[in-house]
Image: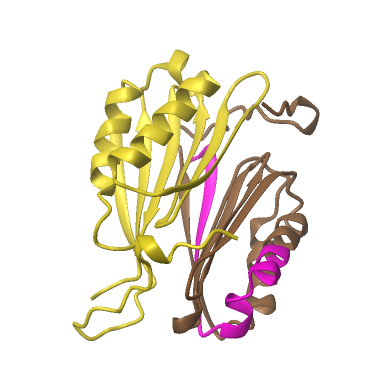
Chain colours: A brown, B yellow
Amino acid sequence: MYALGNHLLVELRDCNSEILKDLNRVKDVMVAAAKEAKATIVDISFHEFNPFGVSGMVVIAESHLSIHTWPEYSYAAVDIFTCGDVIKPEVAVSFLIEQFECKNPSVVEIKRGILSHANEKLPYKFSDSMLKLA
Amino acid sequence: MYALGNHLLVELRDCNSEILKDLNRVKDVMVAAAKEAKATIVDISFHEFNPFGVSGMVVIAESHLSIHTWPEYSYAAVDIFTCGDVIKPEVAVSFLIEQFECKNPSVVEIKRGILSHANEKLPYKFSDSMLKLA
């Protein structure tokens, strides 16, 4: 079955807490992960919470990456939602595990937008040259 | 088992395509949905793609809402990732179904950050007054 979107739910347990509480470092890692996956970055939005913890979104032409960190539990929840054949979300996952020094990761892959139950590929609308930012 | 985050994966099939292709309308609906859920909005980022389709993120103090629309398939993928006891993500889901005139919705709930296997509640760090924007 073909789906419009591919969604990786990444549970990063037993990470380096010092990294997870550093806004700029988390932002740099997420932006680099998007680039590793060959995504086209459209916008980024990262915020730090008191006493600690970072939330961030990387909007990409192919959908998005998000992260929410709980440094006090050495845990981060990452989502990598992509569409199209070019992007390599699994490369981003490996990169994130390495960068956050995660010792206990798990990944669940969910197909989004399964609209065709036949074994046919759904035409995908996006191409780099078609990107129009609002 | 208690989890740090609650993640609703919302599949909105058979929506009104005219609404799904309207950037401002999709943005207004998503922002209103966040407010309906009693979320604290931190940032928003919405983009339109050519020939059609909208991607958008509503960053909230309690995590995020995201949407990606495929008007040509009358389909939208929505995520509502929240933490804390105050927020009402299920209210946002009902609101979105109504606003997008969705005739075939489905929702999967995933618990994120299940770190405690005992029946104990994990302390949750966020409170409104603690919000510090970076």
Which residue is the extreme one toward the front?
B129
Using the image, determine if residue B109 lies above or below residue A119. below
Position of B113 with respect to A83 (left or right) is: left
Q: Position of residue A76 (x, y in %)?
A: 51, 72
Using the image, determine if residue A107 lies above or below residue A100. above
For the point 64% across and 68% down, the residue is A23
A54 in magenta: no
Which residue is the extreme one toward the left?
B119
Bounds of the magenta segment? A1-29
Position of A37 with respect to A23 (left or right) is: right
Q: Position of residue A118 (x, y in %)?
A: 46, 32
For the point 34% across and 40% down, the residue is B35
Does any portion of residue A117 appear in the rendered image? no
For the point 56% across and 84% down, the residue is A17
Q: Nearer the viewer, residue A123 or B50?
A: B50
Figure quadrant of residue B82: bottom left
Using the image, determine if residue B36 lies above or below residue A94. above
